Image: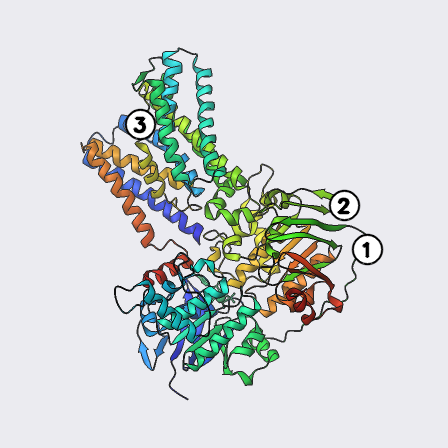
């Protein structure tokens, strides 16, 4: 074993009086891919923030880098040491070219011409085995490509430790493969990677070793071959988790449906029609860019479709604004949590009740603090949301718990139709199953559920029928009972 | 926790007010006289109405820079209708109110429907409203000699309490309840926090913004009413210079320039502090010019302190840190 690149000793972290990390000890060596796993709120992101110097640990903890004790890790210091964190779309400049994004800030000379930028940037990208035109603006790239640019940037600045916090949550499957190739190359060149994800299959593909956190405690660290899925889940959750398949629900035949007819909005999608039957979870899948979210947003009144009709329980409803949609009971959990979901800087309470303020108002149409509190506490219990307090700002919650708050928002709106767009992004395995169960339960209670997801296993596990979209067209409609992952994959690619 | 913090923050403002009061009371022997205290409150009212409007527009994520100009236009209209044309008081006031709401609709339309940035839109209408006022008044001060008009700004109830205070208090309470408890009020906060997310949660952003600019126009109307009564005249730019003070007062009271954060109570306390400072400095014979320097500095210092205190979300702070290093 070589000397550890980074070693954490007795790292704890408290916010006011709440301890979120308790005596964390682990180390990583060069050329290692270490998966950091744990439930939502286990303390993964907090650990990363401490390594990156964004947050300071409580006194008593020590951070060693290359065997040397770091007295106070600051952001500047960690960057100088070669620690680089890939946050999604966070540390890049959308209005600059790819080349500038890679080179700027670490250039060795003061005056550098654009051509030099391009040459150097291309060299880095080539070494990663990635083909991206360096003169494009960053904003012209897909999120996946942007992430690769962020990695190239880290490489250019000679990063020794690259931390990726849920890097694949918005990537298409081809982009994920590309990312894994890049990780393999990084490994070869001796870079250490700390990889955070809730997707266990990814972890078993890419990691050499795993560190498990639970409730801020270090549970176990070991080589990948000492784990299997079942054991890993047990370590994360602290108990056995049983997966119950949902198949075989009887689809009601009473005739009430939620139907979408001939929805068209160029260039996103055209002539999309589907019926959701009573007690059915209806899946929509397809590759990223197939027009699924745009379709859902048109139904929800974000951008009006150029043609198409919606029927709910036999009655035609017209939606020209999200407000109309909610009045009609059509609700939508958006895919992009950061910009379309969360109300940053507002409390958990306000984030929960925002879609149904009337429901927490008294007779005089004034919002009642007590009613709000009751509603929020009910959902915290029902979805097991971990949070400092209901008056905390939403950004204080871990990613997965933020997602649960958004789900509560829509449950609280009393949906008749609930369209969920990638509802389990950033959500841990146990919670993922809870959300699946919840969707099923809602469907059984008469809510029409539309599940949009790129996760084929999810689609197959929860929905009864799946609409496969490709390039804005309805490619196929399949019964999940008779479908396999491969067959759906094929349809979304070829039709 | 944040609720507790807010209370403490307002407590700090109250303490500051008391300290300033004691300080000025010792520095100038006129300051603590009953007449000066009453005139202090009366001064507070004009700035107070305007600040209410400004604070609400700031909560919604904008900044109504036209509020002073609209108030000035209001004084001109009142003076022309009542003083020059001699119309009866009530219909004239009502007409002015409606005209000013119309101006608010214009602001709202520009911001909500044409999606012009609030500050730019209202910078434009600021000039527009002042211009209209100048045309109507032919650029001069229009007098309102009418005795009946004096009630709003020069009448002392029971011989001591300025009438405008009795007008101000219910309006503050109404706006306070509207903002903190009503559904529309909550929606104003959420729109100010993140317009896109607000739309995705079913809020009609356009309608909400229309309400905001209507409300700020209504506040400009009250300011105009009191002011034109107090100085018995109207002029097309009398209240324009108050805009800076309204922003200072609101920010001082904890209203964020980024939207979604702040309270009406805080803003009113901000007004109290700004007013006591300028009144106290008057009493100490500090020149108006120097006072301008002081108010400007106060705004900058408050803004700087707020940023230092790390009021931004960890998410933003993190990005700032990363970006600073990169550049
Ligand atoms: N600023 C803060 N104030 C108070 N508590 C905080 C703050 N930031 C994080 N926490 C708490 O720390 C705990 C750990 O959060 P962290 O973000 O590290 O979780 P995570 O393991 O990354 O979870 P996820 O998988 O959901 O992203 C959470 O319970 C969270 O509420
Ligand atoms: Mg996290």
Which disc, if any, is residue A253?
Answer: 1
Q: Quadrant of the N terminus of chain A?
A: bottom left
Q: Is residue A9 visible?
A: yes
Distance CA(mark 1)–CA(mark 3): 76 Å
Same-chain status of marks 1 and 3 = no
Select label 2 or label 3 by which is in front: 2
Q: Chain of mark 2?
A: A
On the image, which quarter does residue A314 sit in?
top right
The picture places residue B13, in percent across and down from the top left corner, at 33, 43
Q: Chain of mark 1?
A: A
Contact (Cβ within 8 Å) of mark 1 with mark 3: no
The picture places residue A264, in percent across and down from the top left corner, at 65, 49
Count of marks overlaid on the render = 3
* Residue A66 against residue A123 in the figure, above or below: below
Query: On the image, numbered disc 2 is attached to which residue?
Result: A314
* Residue A433 against residue A228 in the figure, above or below: above
Q: Is residue A214 visible?
A: no
Contact (Cβ within 8 Å) of mark 2 with mark 3: no
On the image, which quarter does residue B26 sit in?
top left
């Amino acid at each position: 074993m070589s000397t550890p690149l980074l070693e954490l000793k007795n790292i704890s972290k408290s916010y006011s009086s709440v301890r979120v990390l308790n005596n964390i000890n682990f180390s990583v060596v060069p050329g290692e891919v270490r998966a950091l796993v744990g439930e939502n709120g286990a303390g993964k992101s907090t650990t990363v923030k401490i390594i990156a110097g964004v947050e300071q640990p409580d006194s008593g903890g020590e951070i060693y880098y290359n065997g040397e004790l770091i007295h106070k890790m600051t952001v500047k210091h960690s960057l100088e040491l070669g620690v680089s964190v890939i946050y999604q779309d966070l540390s890049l400049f959308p209005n600059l070219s790819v080349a500038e994004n890679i080179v700027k800030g670490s250039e060795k000379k003061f005056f550098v011409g654009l051509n030099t930028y391009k040459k150097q940037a291309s060299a880095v990208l080539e070494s990663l085995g990635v083909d991206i035109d360096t003169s494009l603006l960053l904003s012209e790239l897909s999120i996946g490509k942007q992430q690769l640019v962020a990695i190239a940037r880290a490489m250019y600045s000679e990063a020794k430790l690259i931390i990726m916090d849920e890097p694949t949550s918005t990537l298409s499957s081809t982009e994920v493969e590309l990312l894994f190739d890049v990780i393999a190359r990084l490994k070869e060149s001796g870079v250490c990677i700390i990889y955070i994800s809730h997707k266990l299959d990814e972890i078993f593909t890419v990691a050499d070793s795993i560190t498990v956190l639970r409730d801020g405690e270090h549970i176990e660290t070991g080589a990948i071959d000492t784990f299997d899925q079942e054991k890993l889940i047990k370590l994360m959750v602290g108990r056995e988790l049983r997966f119950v398949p949902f198949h075989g629900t009887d689809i009601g035949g009473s005739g009430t449906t939620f139907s979408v007819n001939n929805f068209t909005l160029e260039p996103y999608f055209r002539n999309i029609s589907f019926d959701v039957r009573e007690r059915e979870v209806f899946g929509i899948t397809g590759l990223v860019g197939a027009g699924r979210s745009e379709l859902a947003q048109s139904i929800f009144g974000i951008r009006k479709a150029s043609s198409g009709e919606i029927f709910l329980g036999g009655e035609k409803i017209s939606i020209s604004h999200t407000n109309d949609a909610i009045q009609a009971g059509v609700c939508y959990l958006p895919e992009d949590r950061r910009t379309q979901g969360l109300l940053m800087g507002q409390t958990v309470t306000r984030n929960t009740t925002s879609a149904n303020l009337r429901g927490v108002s008294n007779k005089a149409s004034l919002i009642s603090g007590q009613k709000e509190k009751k509603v929020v506490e009910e959902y915290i219990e029902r979805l097991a949301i971990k949070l400092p307090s209901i008056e905390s700002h939403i950004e204080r919650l871990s990613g997965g718990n933020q997602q649960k708050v958004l789900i509560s928002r829509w449950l609280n709106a009393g949906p008749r139709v609930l369209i969920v767009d990638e509802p389990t992004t950033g959500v841990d395995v146990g919670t993922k199953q809870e959300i699946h169960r919840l969707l099923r339960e809602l469907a059984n209670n008469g809510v029409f559920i539309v599940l949009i997801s790129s996760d084929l296993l999810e689609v197959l596990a929860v929905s009864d029928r799946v609409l496969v979209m490709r390039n804005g067209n309805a490619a196929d409609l399949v019964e999940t009972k008779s479908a396999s992952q491969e067959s759906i994959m094929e349809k979304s690619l070829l039709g | 926790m944040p609720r507790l913090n807010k209370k403490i923050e307002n407590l700090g403002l109250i303490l500051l007010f008391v300290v300033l009061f004691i300080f000025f009371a010792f520095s100038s022997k006129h300051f603590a006289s009953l007449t000066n205290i009453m005139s202090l409150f009366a001064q507070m009212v004009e700035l107070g109405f305007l600040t209410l409007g400004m604070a609400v527009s700031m909560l919604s994520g904008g900044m109504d820079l036209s509020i002073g100009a609209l108030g000035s236009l209001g004084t001109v209209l009142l003076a022309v209708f009542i003083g020059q044309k001699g119309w009866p008081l009530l219909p004239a006031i009502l007409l002015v109110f409606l005209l000013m709401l119309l101006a608010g609709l214009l602001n709202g339309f520009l911001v909500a429907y044409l999606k012009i940035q609030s500050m730019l839109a209202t910078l434009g209408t600021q000039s527009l409203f002042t211009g209209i006022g100048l045309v109507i008044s032919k650029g001069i001060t229009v007098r309102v000699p009418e005795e009946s008009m004096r009630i709003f700004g020069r009448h002392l109830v029971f011989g001591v309490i300025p009438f405008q205070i009795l007008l101000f208090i219910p309006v503050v309470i109404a706006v306070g309840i509207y903002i903190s408890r009503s559904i529309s009020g909550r929606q104003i906060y959420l729109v100010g926090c993140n317009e896109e997310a607000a739309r995705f949660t079913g809020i009609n952003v356009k309608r909400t913004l229309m309400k905001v600019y209507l409300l700020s126009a209504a506040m400009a109307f009250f300011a105009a009413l009191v002011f034109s009564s107090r100085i018995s005249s109207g002029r097309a730019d009398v209240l324009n210079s108050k805009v800076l003070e309204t922003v200072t007062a609101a920010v001082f009271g904890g209203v964020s320039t980024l939207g979604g954060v702040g309270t009406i109570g805080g803003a009113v306390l901000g007004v109290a502090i700004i007013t006591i400072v300028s009144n106290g400095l008057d009493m100490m014979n500090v020149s108006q010019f120097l006072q301008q320097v002081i108010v400007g500095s106060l705004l900058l210092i408050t803004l700087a302190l707020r940023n230092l205190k790390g009021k931004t979300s960890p998410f933003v702070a993190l990005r700032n840190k990363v970006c600073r290093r990169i550049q």
